[in-house]
Image: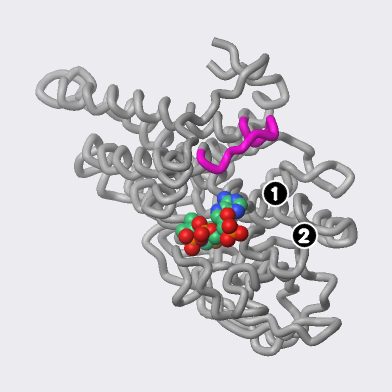
Amino acid sequence: MFNLTEEQLAVQQAARDFAQNELKPGVIERDSKGIYPHEQVKKMAELGFLGMMVPPEYGGGGMDTLSYVLAMEEISKIDNSCSVIMSVNNSLVCWGILKYGTEEQKRKYLPRLASGEWIGSFCLSEPEAGSDATSQRTTAVDMGDHYLLSGTKNWITNGATSKLHLVMAQTDADKGHHGINCLIVEADWPGVSIGAKEDKLGIRSSDTTSIMYSDVKVPKENRIGEDGFGFRFAMETLSGGRIGIASQALGIAAGAYELSVAYSKERSAFGKPISQHQAIAFKIADMATEVEAARLLVYRAAMLKDLGQDYTQAAAMAKLYASGVAMRHTVEAVQIHGGYGFVKEYHVERLMRDAKITQIYEGTSEVQRIVISRNVLKGDLYVPMPTGQELAV
Ligand code: CAA
């Protein structure tokens, strides 16, 4: 098994306590009414969960990716609106700026994002650019010392609450995806407007909106990387983001599994606990096996990232597999709970609804298969297992 350090175990325990004691009591109401979790996000900030991998010099926790994954897993067992807010802020926005931002950008923005004073959003998807992310219609016209940004972004997590947007936009269409830039945009700048909150199947409390930009003046110093680096920035950042969503999917699956085991021991039918009926016991066996397999893939991807090794393929595998496990086994969890599974009070129907989005955002399962197959077919037959002290058998 993975040999977790004392720090990692402490983070896992803190996240578990927070999820069970502070998220669970109100999660059904927030979900059914679509109430944004303001208080809970504030508490996540106080616990250091919003800038976990940001070094202390920029106001973050200076933790590794595995710690982040452990916290995501625990929070996702209960509240996936909170865990997606956390995931986007940590692995797309903070990490993107940390890895590719200038020193000035890091000093200006990371302390606000890591402390939760500001929440960030990652604005890549458009009405006609979802999986086909190179087809950006949002434009950033080069005006010398600034860009003029215009266009519409869709399905943006943290759309209404984020104070900072990382926006991908086309500057030079002749260069295709090499003409895309990523700009740091502040939400209160003139020309930025926010659409209505989407009414969603799952993760109903998080604010998913469209964002419109109309001739927004963005200073050149707010561009990330060299001119034309935006698409590569988006792809590299999304590889890390996919570890976050994979850990969300793992948490959903593990949450449904834990609830199912407990329920199957309590509920009796035909004179014995339903766990003693093979029909249920075999479902539990499949859940146990596949949750564990998902956990190994997710932790491995996180460890490869922490070890500075290539994790693109590992992250895609972890997300593809864990999101499938989340979907399959939340459906089974509802089945095990029978009529109780179909009502909100027992939590599993919410996890089933939440599971679906993990197969869609930050790259659909089909996109993950593109990433994996291209890597495999070019010769990367195996993703290495992390070695050394981190892995004890
Ligand atoms: N790292 C670095 N560079 C990468 C890369 C990676 N992981 N993946 C691709 N690239 C580079 C390629 O090397 C290539 O560069 P060159 O042209 O210089 O050689 C360039 O990017 C284009 O790559 P492809 O030719 O592979 O591009 P494609 O058009 O075939 O698309 C794709 C590839 C994998 C389908 C990609 O478009 C993709 O990932 N799409 C999904 C987008 C996505 O995940 N959206 C999620 C939205 S954000 C979100 O959901 C956040 C939220 O709110 C929760």
Say whether residue 282 is visible: yes
Left or right: where 275 falls relative to 169: left
The magenta span reads 304-313
Crowdedness near tag 2: few (<14), some (14–19) or many (≥20) residues, C-alpha within 10 Å: few
Q: Tell me the kind of residue under disc 2.
A: Glu
Residue depicted at x 75% and y 73%: 186
Q: Earlier in the sequence, mark 1 or mark 2?
A: 1
Tell me the quarter of the picture where residue 62 sits: top right
Residue depicted at x 29% and y 41%: 328
Residue depicted at x 76% and y 82%: 147
How many numbered discs?
A: 2
Q: What residue does disc 2 label?
A: 117
Mark 1: is the Cβ under 8 angstroms from ligand 1?
no
Q: Is residue 177 in the magenta section?
A: no
Image spot of residue 388 (x, y percent): 66, 16
In the rendered image, the vertical position of residue 332 relative to residue 369, given as above or below: above
Image spot of residue 283 (x, y percent): 24, 28
* Helix, strand or loop status at disc 1: loop
Residue depicted at x 56% and y 43%: 312
**Whole-Å distance between the Cαs marked 1 and 2?**
10 Å
Q: Depth check: give the residue in front, 90 or 258.
A: 90
In the rendered image, the vertical position of residue 318 relative to residue 167, given as above or below: above
Q: Is residue 307 in the magenta section?
A: yes
Q: Tell me the kind of residue under disc 1.
A: Leu
Say whether residue 37 is visible: no
Q: What residue does disc 1 label?
A: 50
Mark 2: is the Cβ under 8 angstroms from ligand 1?
no
Image spot of residue 160 (x, y percent): 61, 72
